[in-house]
Image (cartoon, helix red, strand yellow):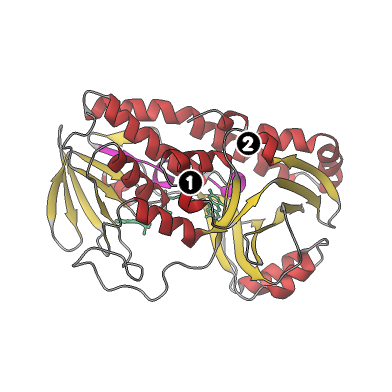
Amino acid sequence: MAGSTLRILVVGAGIAGLAAARALRLAGYRPEITERQPAPRGAGLPGSRPTRPVAFPQTGLYLPGNAARALRELGLDGPVRPLGQVIRRQRFLDAQGHELCEVDLTKLWADVGECRALPTADLHRVLLTGAGGEVRYGTEVRALELTVDAVTVTFADGRRAEYDLVVGADGRRSAVRALAALGGPARPAGQVVYRSVVTGGPPIEDWTGLLGQRAGFVVMPMGAGRLYCYADEAGSVPPADPLARLRELFGDYGGPVPAILDGVEQVRVAVTDEVQLGRWSRGRVVLIGDAAHATAPTLSQGAAMALEDALVLSRALSGAVNVPEALAAYESRRRPRVTWVVDRTRDRDRTRDVPPALRDPLLRGRGGRIFQEHYRLLVDPA
Ligand SMILES: Cc1cc2nc3c(=O)[nH]c(=O)nc-3n(C[C@H](O)[C@H](O)[C@H](O)COP(=O)(O)OP(=O)(O)OC[C@H]3O[C@@H](n4cnc5c(N)ncnc54)[C@H](O)[C@@H]3O)c2cc1C
């Protein structure tokens, strides 16, 4: 169906939706994109709801090498390369700041792509430009009517339109997932996460993670003197005062943590979710990204999986003779890789419950190999 006139609607202008729109356009399709949020400043189609003053909240993202490869395949490596900072090494420390082990990322991802930490907003801007910028903002999907060869979509403003394919890229709380009866709400994955960007902190060149018991603190450079901090603890209820809780949780950590905590002014708090589904499509509706398979961000594979989903879906559509065949091919290609990420994420999260007195000697001896192994399958092409 390469370059066919399929009427495609992509729901959600996050990483998955914008990447899908880009991949589909490269394959000759002309997808529409609809997004529930109002437009960021200067973006959006005529008729979209008014722009919001702050484009994207300030937070960071760590992209392992397979995300860089996917961006390259989307033709977006050029605009991403000047952004953020390349990360060459992961260092794992105990809570006092003593070295446990390290992973040489340049070696692990050789011939795949560079690992990078960057502001999330910067990646969104690149993807938005790559998608052609034509997003219908402030437009929520309210209902789907599925027939054998089409989907009728009702939007919140009452407008109705028919499509040959609806791509649900609307995140872990996906409305498309529920409306197409593909699954219910996401389940808590058991972590409360604190994120912040600090400027003028201590000099840090590597992804640096301090492992405590049922809690951890990760910091990495994003260039221009900015440090992206990601800290988590076991739990499922966000605290009333996240900054106070962050200081309480990590106040006795060593290494760079005290100097970083001194510089933290604002904290974003989130609770992690998991989505596990028996199937990712029904009729002419398919899910990609977090809508299909959200997981705790322990391996930082969420963006990479969303980008790869987009590429594989677009290739499947180009290579198949009809939409159902393409959706089956997409799911069978993506399932094993996503399952690998979910399983390795759970493996790594389980080690949080092991007392440091038992865990740390093991990590000193074999930690580098263990952590490297978590990415083994992902080095291969999607
Ligand atoms: C705390 C935390 C830290 C993370 N850190 C990393 C990291 O370092 N590296 C990494 O790779 N991943 C990380 N992730 C995961 C990553 O952010 C996600 O996997 C990724 O953003 C998923 O993208 P998505 O496009 O599928 O979903 P989303 O980013 O959620 O985008 C969905 C979009 O759909 C829109 N939408 C929702 N409902 C509707 C509707 N009914 N109609 C229209 N539009 C709708 C939303 O407004 C949104 O714009 C992290 C996640 C968390 C929670």
Is the N terminus in the top left, top right, bottom left or bottom right quadrant?
A: top left
Q: Is residue 289 magenta?
A: yes
- Give whichever of discs 1 and 2 has the lower sequence position: 1
> Residue 338: x percent and y percent?
49, 34
**Residue 177 visible in the current orientation:** no
**Residue 206 visible in the current orientation:** yes
Count neighbours of disc 2 (C-alpha within 10 A) and say few if under 14, some if 14 to 19, many if 20 or more.
many
> Residue 283: x percent and y percent?
23, 33
Q: Is residue 364 magenta?
A: no
Point 78% across, 38% down: residue: 367
Q: Amino acid at mark 1?
A: Asp
Determine whether 129 is above or below 20 in the image. below
Q: CA distance from mark 1 to mark 2?
A: 16 Å
**For residue 231, which numbered disc appears in the image?**
none
Residue corresponding to mark 2: 109
Residue corresponding to mark 1: 77
Determine whether 171 is above or below 69 in the image. below
Q: Describe the element under mark 2 as helix, strand or loop.
A: loop
Judging depth in this view, the residue of 243 and 204 nearest the camera is: 204
Region of the chain picked out in magenta, as a range = 285-299
214 sits to left or right of 194: right
Q: Amino acid at mark 2?
A: Trp
Point 61% across, 66% down: residue: 196
Q: Describe the element under mark 1 as helix, strand or loop.
A: helix
8 sits to left or right of 262: left
> Residue 344: x percent and y percent?
61, 36
Residue contact between numbered discs 1 and 2, judged by CB atoms under 8 Å: no
Residue 140, located in which quarter of the rendered image?
bottom left
Determine whether 104 is above or below 1 in the image. below
